[in-house]
Image (cartoon, rainbow, N blue to C red):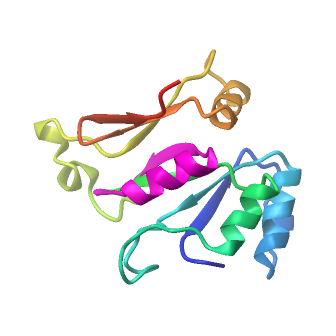
């Protein structure tokens, strides 16, 4: 798998996704109707220069409608390049946090801090409408008191 990793949400059965071939895993997740997004493309553990970019495999997944979103923020790291990839390839914006420690300390919660959040604008509360909103790119990422989204 190219740099980064991906998440498939709204799946029914994880077992068929556990394969040696990553394309097979994406195909199965897509068959189950998953919303699939990629993470950490800007991580220096993944790319020495810390600049998010897509590999041919990512582009193939987008063309086959097996990649729907991209993480533009993870923990304290925002990526202009990941945002541009989202705009160029019409992907849903996602902001997340891998919390390896205490959230209150890591994000200074007692003093008004917050971790990155993906705000999903769904018609109503429930998995089906949240899934629909993600596929329709109805998200904004809240990061460092900024709202990052697409103008519609």
Residue farthest left in this picture = 111
Magenta highlight range: 76-97
Is 88 a magenta residue? yes
Instruction: Say above or below: 93 vs 27.
Output: above
Give the mark count. 0
Residue 144, how many percent across, how many down? 24, 42
Residue 51, image quadrant? bottom left
Identified at 48% across, 33% down, the residue is 150
Is 45 a magenta residue? no
Identified at 82% across, 57% down, the residue is 64
Residue 18, how many percent across, how many down? 79, 72
Residue 1, image quadrant? bottom right
Residue farthest top in this picture = 123
Left or right of 141 on screen, residue 70: right
Residue 38, how many percent across, how many down? 58, 60
Instruction: Say above or below: 139 vs 37.
Output: above
Task: Name the foreground residue: 109 vs 83.
Answer: 83
The answer to whether any part of residue 15 appears in the image is: no
Identified at 54% across, 23% down, the residue is 121
The answer to whether any part of residue 122 appears in the image is: yes
């Amino acid at each position: 798998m190219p740099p980064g990793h991906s998440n498939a949400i709204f799946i029914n059965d994880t077992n068929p996704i556990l394969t040696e071939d990553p394309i097979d895993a994406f195909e199965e997740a897509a068959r189950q109707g998953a919303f699939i997004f990629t993470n950490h493309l800007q991580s220096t553990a993944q790319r020495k220069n810390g600049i998010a970019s897509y590999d041919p495999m990512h582009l193939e997944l987008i063309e086959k409608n097996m990649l729907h979103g991209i993480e533009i923020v993870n923990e304290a790291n925002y990526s202009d390049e990941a945002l541009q990839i989202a705009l160029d390839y019409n992907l849903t914006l996602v902001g997340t946090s891998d919390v390896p420690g205490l959230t209150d300390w890591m994000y200074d919660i007692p003093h008004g801090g917050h971790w990155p959040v993906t705000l999903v604008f769904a018609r109503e509360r429930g998995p089906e409408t949240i899934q629909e909103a993600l596929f329709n790119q109805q998200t904004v990422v809240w990061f460092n008191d900024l709202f990052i989204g697409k103008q519609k």
